[in-house]
Image: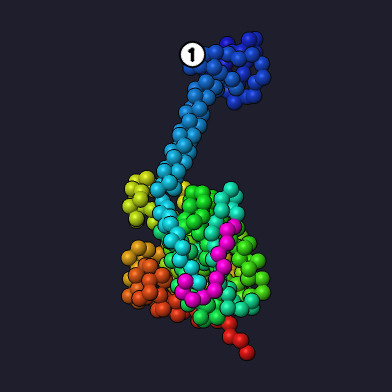
Amino acid sequence: MRTAGESKVGKRTLQRGWIWSGPLHVGGAGLYVLGGFPVLYWLRKAMLAALLVLSAWVAREAVFLLLESQGFEPAAWQGDTPDKLGVSSTQWVMTSGDRQLMASWVSPSPIAPAVLIFHGDEENIGNWAAIQKMLYQHGIASMVFDYSGYGASSGRPTVAHLREDALTALQAFQNRAAGASKRYLLGFSLGTAVLADILPDVQGQVDGAVIASGFATAREEAVKASRAPSWIAPLMPDVWDSEAALSRVNLPVLLLHSRSDEVIDYQQGLRLYHALQGPKRMVALEGLPHDAPVLPAYSQAYWQPVIAWLGPFRSG
């Protein structure tokens, strides 16, 4: 005679919860094993759960690819160089993966402090020709490069490509600035995310970094810029979480942000500042628009604290 807690299998009786490796019994609720455990029922549950996880992953990737395809606004290079402004410069092409990147280098001295610039969206090396001239006049060498798909660079911009581009540019910068007294990295706007993405991994190779008008996370910025509705934000992978990345940085960092920035609000700059763990300085600029670094009417005011922090080279 069987009790309510037992199941008959062949000539044997199993207590529910025992491990059974013999014949299986098919009951009214489905296939049973382990003395009454409904295998088919839970198998269907597991398959449904796996399907939901897969569907969520596919949706997440689809959203990311869609936003990535619309998230960059490359600007074509019009041929502007520091040479046209009276300063000798070198332009050349670097290979990044299967793409060719355009770069520009200006140096007042082989031992001058040098800075590698990661520019913003809707920009190219031509927009930074006047800045390279200004840095030159203050005894600072500089290199600026165009990401994949920007300016005269080939390919298309993607998060993965821009990371590869950044590492390629850093290697070229190290070669160009081999004799520099100090080497720095500077990111502006979009460039702060590109820089922050690699900075935790390369911080031992440079003497400091400048974060100029940066955003805390790409996910928040996409929603704020109306490139994605707020309800879809949870589906977006936060591939550029600069706040988290900078929390792993210990080298000296100068952070600049205008209280009047109409594109990326000042509070995001403060979040990046508080995330930094090493020596740091925050410069709160007053009355300057987002694009102040490359606008002639505002660039002197924006760059003054940067030049002072970089420590210009003076011979003799």
Residue that badge 1 annotates = 28
Q: Magenta stretch containing residue 93, yes or no?
A: yes
User: Around disc 1, counting alpha carbons within 10 Å, would you say few (fewer than 14), some (14 to 19), or many (20 or more)?
Assistant: few
Q: 242 or 3, which lies in front?
A: 242
Instruction: Tell me residue 314's x, y (percent).
Output: 58, 85
Q: Quadrant of residue 268?
A: bottom left
Vertical comparison of 254 with 54: above or below: below
- Please tell me which residue is depicted at 49% across the width and 34% down the height of the picture: 54
Res 266 visible: no
Direction from residue 280 to residue 227 in the image, left or right: left
Q: 125 or 73, which lies in front?
A: 125
Quadrant of the image for the C terminus?
bottom right
Name, please, the residue furthest toward the bottom: 316
Quadrant of the image for the N terminus?
top right
- Please tell me which residue is depicted at 41% across the width and 43% down the height of the picture: 66
Direction from residue 141 to residue 122 in the image, left or right: left
Instruction: Tell me residue 103's x, y (percent).
Output: 54, 62
| Local secondary structure at mark 1 | loop
- Please tell me which residue is depicted at 51% across the width and 55% down the height of the picture: 153
Vertical comparison of 121 with 277: above or below: above
Q: Residues in magenta?
A: 84-94
Instruction: Tell me residue 8's x, y (percent).
Output: 59, 13
Direction from residue 171 to residue 76 in the image, left or right: left
- Please tell me which residue is depicted at 42% across the width and 53% down the height of the picture: 72
Question: In this figure, what is the number of numbered marks?
Answer: 1
Q: 201 or 301, which lies in front?
A: 301
Q: How is the image coloured?
A: rainbow
Res 90 visible: yes
Instruction: Tell me residue 297's x, y (percent).
Output: 35, 76
The amino acid beneath tag 1 is Gly
Vertical comparison of 78 with 287: above or below: above
